[in-house]
Each structure stands twice: as structure tokens, then as C-alpha cells.
Image (spheres, rainbow, N blue to C red):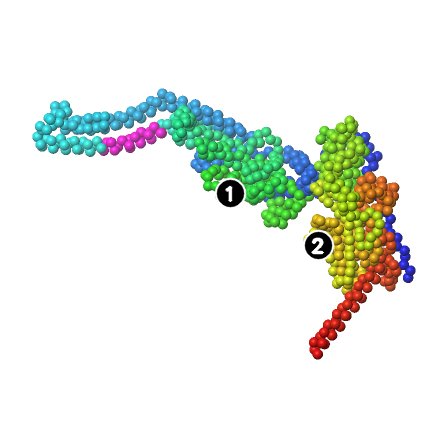
Amino acid sequence: MKHAPFTPPKALEAEVLCHRCNPDQFDFGNTTELADLTEIIGQGRALEAIQFGTDIRRQGYNLFVLGSPGMGRHTVVQQFLEKKAAAEETPPDWCYVNNFSQAHKPRALKLPTGKGVILKRDMELLVEELKVSIPAAFDSDEYRAKAEKIQKEYNDRQENAFKTLGDKAEKQGIALLRTPSGFAFAPMKNGEVINPEEYEKLADDEKQRVEQVISDSQENLQKIIRRFPLWRKEQREKIKLLTRTFTLSAVSHLIDELAEKYADLPGVINYLEAVKQDVLDNENDFRKKEDMTGNAIGMQVVERPSLRRYEVNVVIDHGESHGAPIVLDDYPMVNNLIGRVEHIAQMGALVTDFMLIKPGSLHRANGGYLLLDVYKLLEQPYAWDALKRALYARQVKIESLGQMLSLVSTVSLEPEPIPLDVKIILFGERSYYYLLQEDDPEFDALFKVAADFEEELDRDETNSILFARLIATLARREALQPLDRSAVAKVIEHSARLVEDAEKLTTHIESVADLLREADYWAGKASRQITSAADIQQAIDAQTRRADRVKHRIHEDILRGTVLIDTQGAVVGQANGLSVIELGNFAFAEPVRITATTRLGEGEMINIEREVELSGAIHSKGVLILTSFLAARFSRNRPLSLSASLTFEQSYGTIDGDSASLAELCALLSNLADTPIKQALAVTGSVNQFGQVQAIGSVNEKIEGFFDICRARGLTGEQGVLIPASNVKHLMLHHDVVQAAAEGKFHIYPIETVDQAIALLTGGSAGEPDAQGNLPAGCINNLVATRLFELSVIRQALSGGEKSKHVRKTTKRRL
């Protein structure tokens, strides 16, 4: 059967190499004629998730917004929430007040919206009024009269007791004397106290009587004196009762009036009752004046009675808010998240009270939405655990990190926890989302909704118009000059280039905004009032120029011959591959020389990069696939008697990816067939076990990388790049490559199989088997099959010879 001649694939037409955006499809002159874009394009799935996650009011249905930075996720969510939150109920105020029974455990008060500040002001006025009314009550004639009466009763009682004792002793001839050192008893005669000489003249029995009477009187005096503490206590109780009565009269009506104002708030009523009891117990604090006292180092310190305990600490005030709060915490450390208790230094010591309680972002967002960046959250020690505890407990408990870790023993406050009703929205890249799902068993229970933002959208007529409106919106928002429609078309083309797909547009809004800002700068430098396509192109070229120093150095090494890359001639077992280097946001291609050697062996494919640990897993996989392809196509019925080595010449770093596997396979086939490969062509593409060529990434950069080298050396019309046919839809090549292709100076070939690739590279035919499975003589596949058969025969012969030699040695040993 005669074999049909092989027809290699044709080079792509120039029109296919870059899907241009025709400015004539737009019916506007410049972006001032376009309305602002109010809708979000290309994010239907994410918006549905956001709608669902914010609507459902169940525990654990918090959101994780997935996507790359710069896609406008924060803006989209913020705009969505602003509309939604405006129609929702404004949450209540929260205050911390003193706990008069346990001062280290301040009480939390929930108040209607705007009432927190009012209560604070009411308490300040109450204290001011009490500072006037209580002293006034005690300065009244009525209080003084009653207090004096109680004092007089005590004095009279004391005097009466002494008088009774003195009268009784006097009847027995003994006088009760008051001396500076106390009381004394002395004998009397004729109503006069006798001196010691006269006392000595008394009869002995009289002396005994006097001594007995004095002894009895002294005993009675002691009994009276022992009653004094009890009398003083009774006096103090009466004074205290009197004081409490007058304090109550000064306080009661003031607090009762305040209580009527907050009659519908039981928490406030209980607090006011506690205030009332504390004022009654400590009325003296309202009567004291400033006292000057000296401290240990001789400094004069002004001491004032502290009335701070009656103040109100309004931690959350929504008095001027409308709707649910939306809080963005850019620095979610533990204290910023759950709140903190601050301390102040006094006389070398740190002190605190309930007025130093400060709220966290969870407090401020309570009743609304809290937006957090997951990377920043995980970066802060223990912040992630603190957030999970709050969400599980559904309350915010303020505690310091030192207390949580038991690192400090300082006595501090234990504020009453505040109930939590908040929707958490985390922003992060997909890697963080899946890592948390994998490593944190509690993550799925707390963040049940994922809003996954698309990286790209379809490039159709409708979306192109919407994208033009997006450009107009960004230009107005950034106060940039308007863009004409040619500039809009150029931005759309560049957007497709950013996603490496001619049929898609990027949703990375920040990249588009950066391009518009820089184009506006160049238009301004040229004194143009409207940004044109030339300004957009200049901004793109300037971005590349700023980032391509390394690319320039590498290409310079190739052009100077330091790195060996041929762009003409033909060499056996050598192909030009294309690798991509990524430096931050800038990627460029570096042509690489791939060589292959073959020899007799046992089916081993030596990947030199892997042997020296410079090959990534994907690249190593690609090399192993080559072994399977060769064995399946050429050695089905016999062992693959081949040993081959593959390497990237002058490569000194790690290599990964399988986009060079087609070039590696072609180098192998070239070596086996002893047929040279054209060095004017470069190859990129992945290959499977059936020889089918598969798509790869960064196809534009790879083509342009080889084109730059060829152009620098001079385009001959024979140079070009072989790419997978499935990558044609991704082509958005620079205008200079397209121009060279249109002029026939550079060619892009779409490849579907390895046979097409080897035919183009060698200029021959790969060869297809006939009905009997026979390959045409002289085709590449025939030459490869013949060489592998020769190696198999040689191996069998060598194996037979070794066997005979072994038998002879064995026989000799037997003899």
C-alpha cells in the first residue's frame, strides 16, 4: 500500500496571533460619554454567595471571600454591604459601669441606640447635683440641731453617770475628783477633801471604811467607763441613721427622677439602685474637701474623694449611626479584636478601673459586619484563636494576652462579656482557604460560605461594552483624563493579554487601574487632554522597561555567545526549548538548549536535572512519560533496549513544568533517527503517552522570548516557534511579532501531535503505518524503529554471549 505524503501544519495567519479589539465597535468618542458602571461584571457566583451568606442569620454562616489581591473584592463587598446595612436596624449602645459589690468585675449595660451618651451625661449631672445637695443637707440647721441633740444626749448620759457615782460616794464621805490624768477618789471631812496628814490622823477603822468605799467606787467607775464604747456606738448609730436619713432625702428624689426616665430598662434601674446604696454608704465622699498630704519623698499630693466610680464608660455609641455597622480592621491583633483594659501609672504603680476599658473591632461591628484580611489575622499571635472563641461563645470577653497565657499575675479587671451577633467576612487567597479547611477542623463550622471571585470573564461584545464602562468609571474615580475609544480598545487587548487568553478579560481591577494612571501620566507629559492608544502602549512599554533588567541580561548573554543558543543550522539530538522565568509580576521567556543522547541500555531514561536534584516533580513526570511513549510505539513486543540522557544545557537552577517534554521527545527522536533538527525553530508543549501535544502556560512570553533573540540576530524568514494547537486561542502577541509574521519573517506553527512537530523540525516526514503496520522507508518513525530494533538485537546477542560464557565457567568448575 502506497503511503500518502505527509503534509506539515501551516503557519498561523497574522490575524490569529492577536485578537484585536476594533475601536469601531464602540459608539462613543471618549469615556466621558459613558455612564458609570454600577453592576459587578463577571462575578455572579460570588455575588450569590455574598447575598446568601449575609442574609442567613444562623450560627457559623460567616463568609470567606476568595480571590487574588487587586481584584476589587473589598470594594465589591463594601458596596454590597453599604446598600444592605443601610436598610438594617441600628444596633444598641453598650456601656460599662462600676460593679459596687465586685469592683474588678465591671457590669455591661445594653442601651437603646443613642442612650449610652445620654446616660453618661445624666450620671455626670447627678454627681454634680449630689456634690451640692448632700453638703447642703448637712449644713442645714435641722441636721445640726438633731446631731447636737444626739451629742448632747450622749454627753448628758455620761455626765449623769458620773454625777450619780459622785453623789453616792459623797454620801459616804468620798469625793470624785476630775484630774488631767483621769478620775480619782479622796476622803472628805466637813465637805472638804482632807490632806494626807489629816488622813493619817484618822482611826484605823475609819481608814478601812474609806478604803473600802474608794475601792467600791473605783469598781463602779470602771463599770461606767466600760459602758462608754456601747454608748458611743449607740451615738454613732444614731448619727449614722440621721446621716443616712438626710442623705436619702437629698439623694432619693434625684435618683428616682432619673429612674423614671429609664423605667423601661431594668439593667439601668438596677444600676441606679446600686448607685443609690453606694451614695448612702459613702456620703462623706461628697462632703470632703481637698486635703494636702505629704508622700514618702516629701512631695505634696492633692487628694480628692474619688467619684469616678459613678461615671459611665460608653464603649459603643451608635447615636449618630444609621443602619448596621460595617467595620474594617486592618490590624487585627488580639487587643484590637476583642478589646483591652488599659492602665495608667500612679506613683510608680499601674492602676486601672472600668473607665479604662476600650472596645475592640468585634464590639464596634456587633450587630453588623466585620471585614478582616485572613493573612493579617493569622499573622497576629493568638488572634485567630480569640476570634474563634468569640464566635463559638457568641460573646466578646475582654482579657489580656498575658492573662490568657498565664504570663502575668497582676490583678486586673474582668469585664462582663457582651453578647455577640456579628457577621465575619474574611478576605484571602485561595491557598489560605484550602489550608484552613485542611488544617483547622473548626474552620468549616464557622465559615460555611465561600464567595469565590472569578479571575476572568468572557470576552464578548456585551462584556466589552461593560468593560469600557468600567474603564470610564475608574478614570472618573481616579480623576484621570478621559480615554478615547482607541485607548479603551487597547486596554481591553491588554486585559486579555493579562489573563493569557484572547477569549477572556481580566477581573484584576488594580492592574487595569494602574495602567490607566500611568497612561494618564504619559498623556499629560505630551500635553494631551484625552488619553489615546499610544499613551496606553507607552504605559505598557514603560512597565516592561522598568522590570526587564534581568531579561535583558539573559538575552545579552545569549547574543554574545556566553549562553549557547543556535537560531540557524541543524543539529542531531538538539532542540530549542522555551522556559519562563517569573520575577514578581513580570514574566519573560528564556530560550534553552535541550540535548539528548542515546545508547544501548535497558530502557533507562536519565533526567540529568533530576539526578542533581534540579528537576521539579512535574518535569520529572514529563520525562517518565517519554519513556512510556517510546516503549508503547516502538517496543511493544520486545524490551526497550535503550539508555538515554536528557538535559537542559547551561541551566543552573531548578526546572519544573512539563512544557519542555515535546522538545525533549523531539531531541530523542532526532538522536535515534540520526536526523538533524532545524535550530531556526523553537518548541514548546507538553506531550502525553499517545504522542498528543497538550496546552502549556505563558505561550505569549515564550514566543516573544525566542522572537527577540531571532530579531536581534536578524530575521531570515525560516525562524519560528512550534506551539500546541490548543494554545492558539490564548495568543495575544506583541505587535512586532504579529508584524513579522505578516511579512513572512517569523512563523507560529500549531502542533497537535509529536509526528507533526518532528516533521517540521527535521523537514522530513514522520511517517504513518499502512494497513499492515509497515512504515515508509526513510521516514523519521521508521528510522527510530530501525535503530531501536538494532539496539534490541545487539542486547540479545550480548545477553546470549554472556550466557554461554557463564555456562562454560560453570562446566569448568564442575570438571
Residue 201 seen in the figure: yes
Residue 245 seen in the figure: no
Query: Residue at position x 79%, y 66% from top?
Result: 794
Where are the magenta residues, as a range?
Answer: 223-241
Q: Position of residue 174 (x, y in %)?
A: 15, 28
The numbered dot on residue 404 is: 1
Q: Is residue 620 left or right of residue 391?
A: right
**CA distance for labels 2 and 1:** 49 Å
User: Which one is in front in this view, the residue at disc 2 or the one at disc 1?
Assistant: 2
Q: Is residue 232 magenta?
A: yes
Instruction: Name the magenta segment's main secondary structure.
Output: helix
* Kind of residue indicated by mark 1: Met
Q: Position of residue 33 (x, y in %)?
A: 78, 29
Q: Residue furthest top?
A: 141
Tell me the element at label 1. Answer: helix
Tell me the element at label 2. Answer: helix
Residue position marked by numbered label 2 in the rendering = 610
Q: Position of residue 569 (x, y in %)?
A: 84, 50
Q: Is residue 157 magenta?
A: no
Q: Position of residue 376 (x, y in %)?
A: 61, 40
Query: Residue at position x 74%, y 30% from top?
Result: 521
Quadrant assignment, res 280 = top left
Query: Residue at position x 77%, y 64% from top?
Result: 639
Q: Front-most of 19 and 418?
A: 19
Q: Quadrant of the C terminus?
A: bottom right
Q: Quadrant of the N terminus?
A: bottom right
Within 10 angstroms of label 2, few (less than 14), some, or many (20 or more) residues? Answer: some
Q: Front-most of 785 and 162?
A: 785
